[in-house]
Image: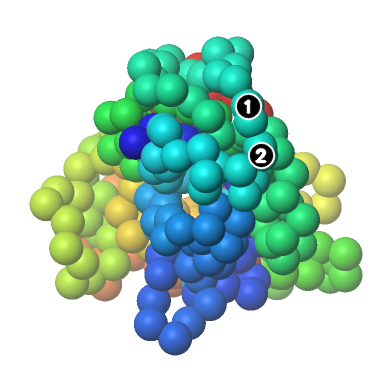
Amino acid sequence: MSRYFIHLAYHGGNYCGWQTQPNLPTVQLTLEQALTTLLRQPTAVVGCGRTDTGVHASDFYAHFDYPSKNSQQNEAIEGESSCDEEKTTKPTSKSTNILDTDLLTFKLNSYLPGDIAIYSIFSVADNAHARFDAVARTYQYHVSDRRLPFRQGLYCRIFFKPDIDRMNEAAQVLMEYDDFTSFAKLHTQVKTNICHLSEAHWDEVGDEWVFTIRSNRFLRNMVRSVTGTLLDVGRGKLSIDGLREIVERKDRCAAGVSMPAQGLFLTKVEYPWETKK
């Protein structure tokens, strides 16, 4: 078997998140069905993470396995093709690469609905893993106090003008901590609530305020609850000392409201080797 990474993006508005769920539309299920049809064999994909219902991803990776020597099935996609070493990443796969990844990318983009885009498909080492090999992820949350008709479903409207300087001061306070239990969804199956933040800041971009946060890992619902709590600081409802108290209490009930899904984007996934777009 040879392993391949898929670099993709999706608008999450029509999906109940990334992960397959019974009788519900998800990005993973849609992608697996498309690959199964085009490759003429059952094909499972593993994503770099799990986005919730309505959350978007402008940078997402998944992997799947395909027989390295199966010319009869491969002809369904590509006919005869030789290995293209230029499309591999580090670590590279030693298996024979007979899948025409450019053609499969083209056919997937023709087959999939318009809210999912495949940027590229490339060969990787047989033990490369889209989820466990990722070393950092970046999310952004978009808010605005204006009605933006051409951004519907891509931002959250708020009804006050936040103090961005105070929110940035609060965001830097978060960088001092690594236990984010206060911002984690309750009753989830995780071994630890420790996350190592490397970036957290607000920027004014056009008519929107955008919160960017980068970490080695994130807890479920963490970014949305952190955003809601920082907006409480920005509206004068919460002090900096109050934010510290929330973090140190390690109690989800102490933090602010969880923001709606439509303003949240997964914008970057990083690996210890270079990936190609």
Residue 171 picture location, percent across and down = 46, 41
Report the residue marked by disc 1. Answer: 81
Residue 214 picture location, percent across and down = 45, 36
Given residues 5 and 9, the one toward you in this image is 5
Given residues 74 and 207, the one toward you in this image is 74
Report the residue marked by disc 2. Answer: 78
Displayed quadrant of residue 38? bottom right
Q: In the displayed structure, does residue 234 sit left or right of residue 44?
A: right
Quadrant of the drawing holding the N terminus: top left
Q: Say few, some or many: other residues with alpha carbon within 10 Å of mark 2 (under 14 / 14 to 19 / 20 or more).
A: some
Displayed quadrant of residue 92? top left
Residue 42 picture location, percent across and down = 42, 61
Displayed quadrant of residue 100? top right
- Helix, strand or loop at mark 1: loop
Instruction: Determine contact: label 2, label 1, CB under 8 Å.
Output: yes
Quadrant of the drawing holding the C terminus: top right
Task: Please name the amino acid that badge 2 sits on.
Answer: Glu
**Residue at 83% across, 46% down:** 206
Task: Please name the amino acid that badge 1 sits on.
Answer: Ser
**Residue at 69% across, 34% down:** 102
Q: Can residue 100 be seen in this view?
A: yes
- Helix, strand or loop at mark 2: loop
Give the vertical position of 258 relative to 213 (above or below). Answer: below
**Residue at 64% across, 74% down:** 14
Residue 263 picture location, percent across and down = 62, 61
Q: In the displayed structure, does residue 213 sit left or right of residue 127?
A: right
Given residues 212 and 42, the one toward you in this image is 42
